[in-house]
Image (cartoon, rainbow, N blue to C red):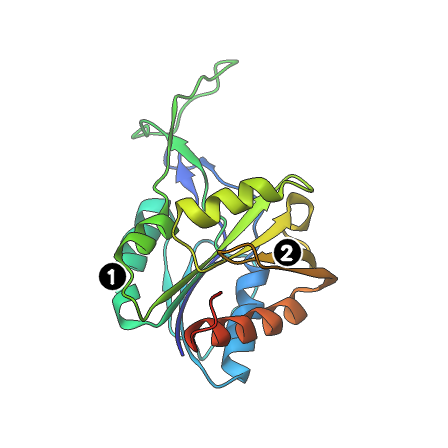
């Protein structure tokens, strides 16, 4: 497979020194890249500002914002068989960005707007021979929201995981497919989930998406 893999957070600037972001480290993305490499697949990484080491011998594209990641994904996806959207893209960004560092005046009100839905945009463009896989970081037990995302974003597989796993070395997940199939993965190191997920992606591209 030729796999396009996103990882890490995005940083949405408030001014030249401040930003809106999240605690994603990129650890799940690093584990997936290594698992894909061990299985003999080609990988391209699109990385937000990750805080963990990435495999040095895998091509990477570094971005900061959701818009930059969107443009990189839409540019690179046509040359790949599979997109795994493991990045924790910030859901919101400031509607306007200050040109200079804002001073401290006792309070600050920010007007926010939604960032682009990257995996949904890729899902609209994918060819019949391509697959898209997303992640759904939700409150514990909220599988219904993950199922809605699976349909709304035209995904072939979605990985539900509770919000407590962000930045952690461990992960508990449920894999969801169109048609209602699911697979529970008990708490384990992210490297072990990565091996499982790469195997499921192989099955997707072999025609076993249902």
Q: Position of residue 176 (x, y in %)?
A: 56, 56
Vertical placement of residue 195 versus 162, above or below: below
* Quadrant of res 194: bottom right
Residue lying at the far bottom in this picture: please name it: 40
Give the camera-side residue of 108 and 168. Answer: 168
Residue 169 numbered tag = none
**At x 46% / y 71%, what residue is drawn?**
204
Give the camera-side residue of 64 and 177. Answer: 177
Q: Position of residue 25 (x, y in %)?
A: 57, 54
**At x 49% / y 65%, what residue is drawn?**
210
Location of the N terminus by quadrant is: bottom left
Vertical placement of residue 95 versus 140, above or below: above
* Quadrant of res 41: bottom left
Which residue bears the numbered disc 2?
174
Q: Position of residue 20 (x, y in %)?
A: 47, 36
Vertical placement of residue 150 versus 58, above or below: above
Q: Is residue 58 left or right of residue 75?
A: right
Look at discs 1 and 2 and give the one toward the viewer.
Answer: 2
Q: Position of residue 153 (x, y in %)?
A: 39, 48
Give the camera-side residue of 191 and 19. Answer: 191
Q: Is residue 83 left or right of residue 77?
A: right
**At x 58% / y 62%, what residue is drawn?**
28
Residue lying at the far right in this picture: please name it: 187
Tell me whether the residue at label 1 lies in contact with that at label 2, contact meaning CB atoms closer than 8 angstroms. Answer: no
Q: Residues within 10 Å of mark 2 (few under 14, many from 20)?
A: some
Label 1: element kind: helix
Q: Is residue 49 visible?
A: yes
Residue 75 numbered tag = 1
Vertical placement of residue 183 versus 43, above or below: above
């Amino acid at each position: 497979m030729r796999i396009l893999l996103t990882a890490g957070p995005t940083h949405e600037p408030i001014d030249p020194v401040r930003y809106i972001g999240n605690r994603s480290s990129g650890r799940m993305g690093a584990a997936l890249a290594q698992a894909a490499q061990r299985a003999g697949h080609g990988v391209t990484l699109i990385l937000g500002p990750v805080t963990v080491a990435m495999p040095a011998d895998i091509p990477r594209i570094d971005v900061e914002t959701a818009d930059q990641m969107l443009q990189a994904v839409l540019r690179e996806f046509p040359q790949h068989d599979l997109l795994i959207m493991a990045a924790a893209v910030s859901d919101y960004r400031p509607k306007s960005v200050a040109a200079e560092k804002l001073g401290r005046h006792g309070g600050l009100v920010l007007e926010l707007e939604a960032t682009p839905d990257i995996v949904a945009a890729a899902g609209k463009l994918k060819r019949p021979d391509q697959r898209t896989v997303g992640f759904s970081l939700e409150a514990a037990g909220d599988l219904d929201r993950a199922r809605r995302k699976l349909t709304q974003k035209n995904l072939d597989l979605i990985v539900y995981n509770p919000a407590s796993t962000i930045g952690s070395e461990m992960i508990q997940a449920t894999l969801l497919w169109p048609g209602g199939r699911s697979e529970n993965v008990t708490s384990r190191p992210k490297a072990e989930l990565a091996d499982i997920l790469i195997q499921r992606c192989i099955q997707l591209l072999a025609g076993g998406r249902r």
